[in-house]
Amino acid sequence: MTIRLGDTAPDFTAETTEGTIEFHQWLGDGWGILFSHPKDYTPVCTTELGRVANLKGEFEKRNVKVIAVSVDPLESHKGWINDINETQSCTMNYPIIADPDRNVATMYGMIHPNALDNLTVRSVFIIGPDKKVKLQLTYPASTGRNFDEILRVIDSLQLTANYQVATPADWKHGEDCVVVPAIKTEDIPAKFPKGFKEVKPYLRMTPQPDL
Ligand code: BEZ
């Protein structure tokens, strides 16, 4: 199945290392990240899952729940968690979905057979409080993801959702943002009291509004 930005994230019921979940209910009213990894007891995946556990506080600050998935069974996930904790100096603190029948993987198009036979590639779905897909990323098995970048994207998405700003190339937290084209220049002062700079009529910059 092809999922596009703006589509409702497919709902499912699945076994996880923290019990059975109904995905939409589990997400609640906040943001969510569903990310797949190819296989338990593999090196890159071990580092990724540990990194996400160590970033839990950063995700919580942003009201984001995180959940991992792979096609390995629950007992495998449970055993592997000990290795993740031991080698990545973390305590696993979010669920891993066991998807041996590839139900979730198929729903989300996480299996790319020409890249990796019958295993999930490294997919990331960021889901908004409205359950719509806000971002998707696909990485090959050989490249571990940059979770600082994923936090950066969440900051950008949340700024857009809350303040009608976009973020320019290579934007980092604290830097100026772009006023979205839907706002007329004459309406900017009322909406952005910190001021703005009109570089071009279509390129209006304003300080990051939530600081
Ligand atoms: C890894 O996590 O290191 C990995 C998993 C599957 C294929 C290649 C690498």
Image (spheres, rainbow, N blue to C red):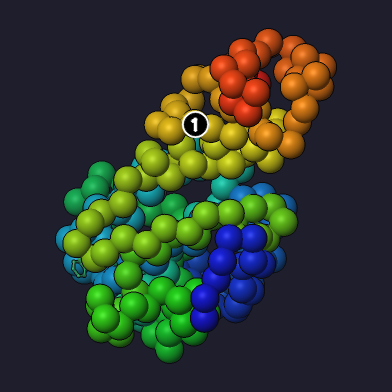
x 64%, y 53%: residue: 128
Reply above or below: 184 against 43.
Answer: above
Q: Quadrant of residue 147?
A: top left
x 48%, y 25%: residue: 173
**Could you tell me which quadrant the C terminus lies in?**
top right
Locate residue 187 relative to residue 32 in the image: left or right.
Answer: right
Reply above or below: 11 against 178.
Answer: below
Name, please, the residue furthest toward the bottom: 101
- Numbered disc total: 1
- Residue 191 visible? The answer is no
Q: Amino acid at mark 1?
A: Pro
Quadrant of the displayed image that contains ligand 1 = bottom left
Locate residue 107 relative to residue 149 in the image: left or right.
Answer: right
Give coordinates of residue 181: x percent, y percent. 68, 34
Give coordinates of residue 75: x percent, y percent. 34, 78
Determine which residue is flagged by label 1: 168
x 66%, y 33%: residue: 180
Label 1 secondary element: loop
